[in-house]
């Protein structure tokens, strides 16, 4: 067999250039003003899949942004089928003034490619079509069949993905799912993620009066909805970080002593971590280590809070309305709908009669954890060892990719999270980057994974 790795070394520039072209497209799924760009990115992905050797590619319209599908199904008889999932949509780039170079003008500085979407997820999903192409162009064939499902709504909670999967179980039929949309512990510490948290996302609206009021004329007559809101929010957690929503922890799966021993073995230094975040101190639920708290314990956080005057200088006003957005990161076996209901019920309970409170559930998804000795995860580990020269560790992460639980539930297939990002990539933040070395090594790992999965 000719060398796939030699081919990839020769084609580094081409792979990088194509990624840079895709990164120039501002496919911000949450911004209706960018719908055309989102579609343009979908068309790019479709064309790139075809250029990579897919014999069939489709752009499938949904009520939201399009789903891109592609396949190459000519592997030797009996070979497994791999379904690659990824997303071509990105988060908004704001605040723009904190970017050193503009978010949609990809720039390489000191071996790092800066652009919105470079790590999440354009620079990660694309290693898989590149890996297929490397096999096809070196050997004329690939050891496994490959299907691609690349969506454009991941960053807004994938509202049209589960219905699509339900309707297309046959089309998507596979033996294993592969996703690169997470990170490894460090450049020299390859790791495979075997657990993700779920999510329940809520928005609260508190209304006091029919319009804003002069805070001198009316101050003292009515409850200020912003005051009411912060009082309600302050009751959600106790001083030690325990969430007080009734029944919140009912279904939380306890870590086993063995799992806790595995956590202790992972290389992690609280002081280094604290410094890397620029935080005066680390804080969280008592009785759990930092790594446990950020991946195996549920959380409740205010993601945004607003109302009243936000401009320059002072304005004396009692706002008519105040708002907050709240997210709960969930762990097995919590159910996102159940948690959303419990938080809603709790907020109703603690809301004063003097204001009106509406709590909307925006979206959610379920947590997932897989046994590390699963043959598919072991194949991922071997692929990383070949590309990075070191045994991969197994970690759980705190972020969410809800479709992983969907694949598990609806298709009963394992998922390998071959994440090639790094912890300091700056996902969802200014100056998001992809380390260029990681990108090339990651592409190699993706190519090896196709071989390892055929074993
Ligand atoms: N790539 C991330 C998920 C991620 C990040 C997993 C880091 C593990 C480590 C993904 O694009 C993302 O941001 N997902 C959202 C979930 C969604 C339902 C909006 C998230 O985790 O906030
Ligand atoms: Zn992502």
Image (cartoon, rainbow, N blue to C red):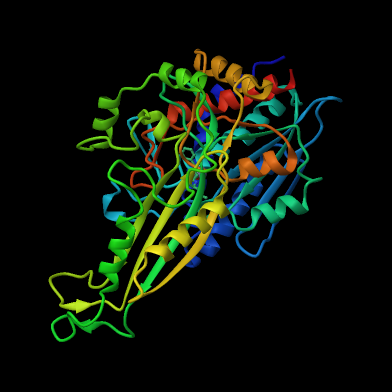
Left or right: 442, with 267 as reference point: right
Of 244 and 156, nearer the camera is 244
Instruction: Quadrant for the N terminus, please.
Output: top right
Left or right: 114, with 223 as reference point: right
Note whether 325 is above or below 389 in the view shown: below
Q: Residue at x 57, y 23 (%)?
A: 444
* Residue 352 spot, x, y in % from top left: 34, 70
Q: Residue at x 17, y 80 (%)?
A: 219
Note whether 54 is above or below 213 in the view shown: above
Residue 393 appears in the figure: no
Instruction: Quadrant for the C terminus, please.
Output: top right
Residue 289 appears in the figure: yes
Q: Residue furthest right?
A: 77
Left or right: 434, with 272 as reference point: right
* Residue 12 spot, x, y in % from top left: 52, 28
* Residue 270 spot, x, y in % from top left: 29, 26
């Amino acid at each position: 067999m000719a060398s796939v790795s030699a081919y990839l070394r020769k084609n580094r520039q081409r792979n990088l250039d194509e990624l840079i072209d895709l990164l120039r497209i501002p496919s911000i799924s949450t911004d209706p003003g960018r719908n055309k760009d989102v579609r343009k990115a979908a068309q790019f992905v479709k064309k790139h899949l075809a250029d990579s050797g897919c014999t069939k590619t489709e752009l499938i319209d949904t009520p939201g942004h399009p789903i891109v599908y592609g396949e190459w199904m000519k592997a030797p008889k009996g070979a497994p089928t791999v379904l690659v999932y990824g997303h071509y949509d990105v988060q908004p780039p704001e605040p723009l003034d904190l970017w050193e170079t503009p978010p949609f003008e990809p720039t390489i500085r000191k071996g790092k490619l800066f652009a919105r979407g470079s790590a999440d997820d354009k620079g990660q999903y694309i290693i898989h079509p590149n890996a297929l192409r490397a096999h096809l162009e070196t050997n004329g064939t690939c050891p496994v069949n490959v299907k691609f499902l690349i969506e454009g709504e991941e960053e807004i909670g994938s509202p049209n993905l589960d219905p699509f999967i339900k309707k297309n179980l046959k089309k998507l039929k596979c033996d294993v799912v592969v996703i690169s949309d997470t990170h490894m512990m460090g450049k020299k510490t390859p790791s495979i993620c075997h657990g993700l948290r779920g999510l329940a996302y809520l928005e609260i609206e508190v209304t006091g009066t029919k319009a804003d009021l002069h805070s001198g004329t009316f101050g003292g007559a009515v409850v200020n909805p912003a005051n009411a809101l912060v009082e309600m929010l302050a009751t959600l957690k106790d001083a030690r970080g325990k969430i007080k929503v009734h029944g919140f922890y009912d279904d939380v799966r306890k870590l086993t002593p063995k799992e806790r021993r595995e956590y202790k073995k992972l290389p992690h230094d609280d002081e280094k971590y604290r410094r890397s975040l620029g935080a005066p101190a680390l804080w969280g639920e008592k009785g759990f280590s930092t790594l446990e708290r950020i991946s195996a314990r549920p959380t409740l956080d205010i993601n945004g809070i607003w109302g009243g005057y936000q401009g320059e200088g002072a304005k004396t006003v009692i706002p008519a309305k105040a708002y907050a957005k709240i997210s709960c990161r969930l762990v097995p076996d919590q159910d996102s709908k159940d948690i959303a209901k419990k938080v809603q019920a709790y907020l109703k309970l603690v809301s004063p009669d003097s204001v009106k409170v509406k709590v909307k559930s925006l979206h959610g998804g379920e947590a997932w954890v897989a046994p590390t000795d699963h043959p598919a995860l072991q194949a991922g580990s071997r692929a990383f060892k070949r590309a990075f020269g070191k045994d991969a560790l197994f970690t759980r992460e705190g972020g969410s990719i809800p479709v992983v639980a969907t694949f598990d539930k609806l298709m009963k297939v394992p998922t390998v999270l071959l994440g090639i990002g790094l912890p300091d990539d700056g996902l969802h933040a200014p100056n998001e980057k992809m380390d260029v070395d990681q990108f090339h090594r990651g592409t190699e790992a993706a190519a090896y994974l196709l071989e390892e999965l055929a074993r």
